[in-house]
Amino acid sequence: MPLPIAHSMAGYAIAEATNFRLANNKWLNVSIFAALANLPDIDFLPGFLLGAPNRYHHQLTHSIGFSLAAGLCGALILWWWNHRKMARQDIAATKNSFGIYFLIVAGAVFSHCVLDLFTWDSWPPHGMPLLWPLLERYFDVRWDIFLSVRKSDDSATFFSTLFQWFNFKIALREFLIMAPLVGLVKLIRRLPGLLIRRRPVDIKNTQVAKLGLLEISSLPPEQANRRSLTSLAEAAEQDDSER
Ligand SMILES: [Zn+2]
């Protein structure tokens, strides 16, 4: 498995890629996406409680079925939460976003399986039941981008064995692989704003002016070339004093 670094950065990239938020606060939103991208590794927990953390690892939580179930639960929770807060006229909008929430939550969870697929798997069973419940067989790919973390299969020493130099190098490798991906997503999101230059609006071409609701009168010739409102005010004062 990759460390939580790669999975969390994948969650961050998904959070950056969508306008739909799982929380109003930006960093809470990113944290929820990161947690979802790490969720399948919850299968360490039952084995850890029984003394052998790897016993149930890479089982059903690493599958499309679990990802879709998590997406459904997440969308239901968000729908219920928004339903409580929204006024009656906005409920239709909430219904429309149910499908989007389902997809982004399921996508964030399934991103975990994708990264695990591209990881060297040192523990049997190799791979994961990716298409469960459609297919029971285990899937793995030979193109391993991420290295396997060195860890103990004894709950008493599991966490202490994670803190070793080899795993630190793996963490650095994960960061260097995922950082360009996150950067690319952020760049693509900001590209339209960078490419489209805001042009000054000609007030005569606005809809209000075209409907005849805006009366535009030209400045007197002696004031037309003045640069600012301040200079116009000064000119007006000067005219008054001359009179
Ligand atoms: Zn995993």
Image (cartoon, rainbow, N blue to C red):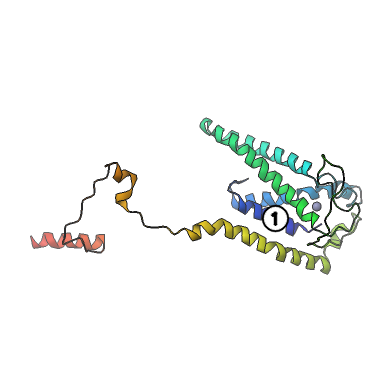
Q: Position of residue 181 (x, y in %)?
A: 66, 60
Q: Residue at x 63, y 51 (%)?
A: 15
The residue at label 1 has a CB less than 8 Å from ligand 1: no
Query: Would you say 217 lies left or right of 4 here?
Result: left
Identify whether 82 is placed above or below 166: above
Quadrant where the C terminus sits is bottom left
Q: Residue at x 39, y 58 (%)?
A: 199
Q: Give 98 or 54, whichever is nearer the viewer.
A: 98
Q: Is residue 27 visible?
A: no
Q: Position of residue 177 (x, y in %)?
A: 72, 64
The amino acid sitting under disc 1 is Ala
* Label 1: element kind: helix
Q: Residue at x 78, y 59 (%)?
A: 3
Query: Residue 237 falls in which quadrant of the image?
Result: bottom left
Q: Position of residue 33 (x, y in %)?
A: 68, 50
Query: Would you say 188 lies left or right of 141 here?
Result: left
Query: Residue 186 falls in which quadrant of the image?
Result: bottom right
Q: Position of residue 208 (x, y in %)?
A: 31, 44
Q: Is residue 147 visible?
A: yes
Q: Residue at x 12, y 59 (%)?
A: 240
Label 1 belongs to which residue? 10
Q: Give 85 or 141, whichever is nearer the viewer.
A: 141
Query: Would you say 202 lies left or right of 45 here?
Result: left
How crowded pointer 1 is (Cα within 10 Å; few <14, some 14-19, many 20+) is rated as many
Quadrant where the N terminus sits is bottom right
Which residue is farthest left? 243
